[in-house]
Image: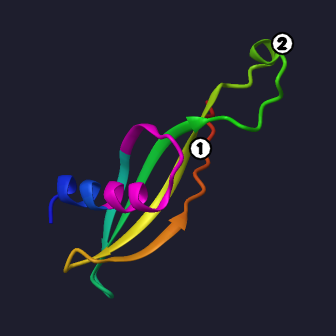
Amino acid sequence: MNFQELYTLAKSELDSITKVEKSDIRLEQVSFNETDETWEVIISYLVENNNQTVNPLTALKGVPPFERIFKKVLIDSKKGVKGFFIYEHYPKKWSL
């Protein structure tokens, strides 16, 4: 399978089980596990940030109107989805 096929399968599975309005869907990472012959596909998308308060000053506080959500999808060699997981992505801090 190529990356485009894996992305399409993962996105299709995500669309079929979530009803939230998504935008800017990205393929973030792909790896193959030779032991169980599954692909681990990480995709992300933007959703409206529901954690912000309804206050016009929130923009000044740096609370973004959208947040990026990450999901991990396991796909086997027969193109079957074997797992769907919350994926916590914490960016590494840069240091000099």
Read off the residue under disc 1: 92
Would you say the residues marked 2 and 1 are in contact, meaning their CB atoms lie under 8 Å apart? no
The residue tagged with tag 2: helix, strand or loop?
loop
Q: Residue at x 47, y 69 (%)?
A: 84
Question: For the residue carrying disc 1, how many other residues have a C-alpha within 10 Å: few (<14), some (14-19), or many (20+)?
Answer: few
Q: Is residue 89 left or right of residue 13?
A: right
Image coordinates of residue 2 in percent, x first then y, are 15, 59
Real-space Cα separation, disc 2 to disc 1, in angstroms: 29 Å
Going from N to C along the chain, the mark reached first, 2 or 1, is 2
- When the figure is inspected, residue 50 is found, relative to residue 65, above or below; the finding is below
Which quadrant is the C terminus positioned in?
top right
Give x and y (percent) for residue 42.
41, 57
Q: Is residue 34 left or right of residue 24?
A: left
Percent position of residue 18, x then y:
50, 56
Residue located beneath label 2 in the image = 57
In the figure, is residue 67 to the left or right of 2?
right
The label number, if any, that marks residue 4 in the structure image: none
Question: Which corner quadrant of the image does residue 79 belong to?
Answer: bottom left
Which quarter of the picture shows residue 76? Answer: bottom left
- Comparing 40 with 54, the one in front is 54
| SS label for mark 1 | loop
Between label 2 and label 1, give the one nearer the viewer: 2
Residue at point 80%, 18% (across, down)? 58
Task: Point out the image quarter for the N terminus.
Answer: bottom left
The amino acid type of the residue labelled 1 equals Lys
Q: Identify the amino acid type marked 2.
A: Leu
Seen as rendered, the residue at the extreme front is 19
Q: Residue 33, position in %: x, y?
A: 32, 77
Q: Which residues are magenta?
A: 10-26
Against 1, residue 91 (above or below) is above
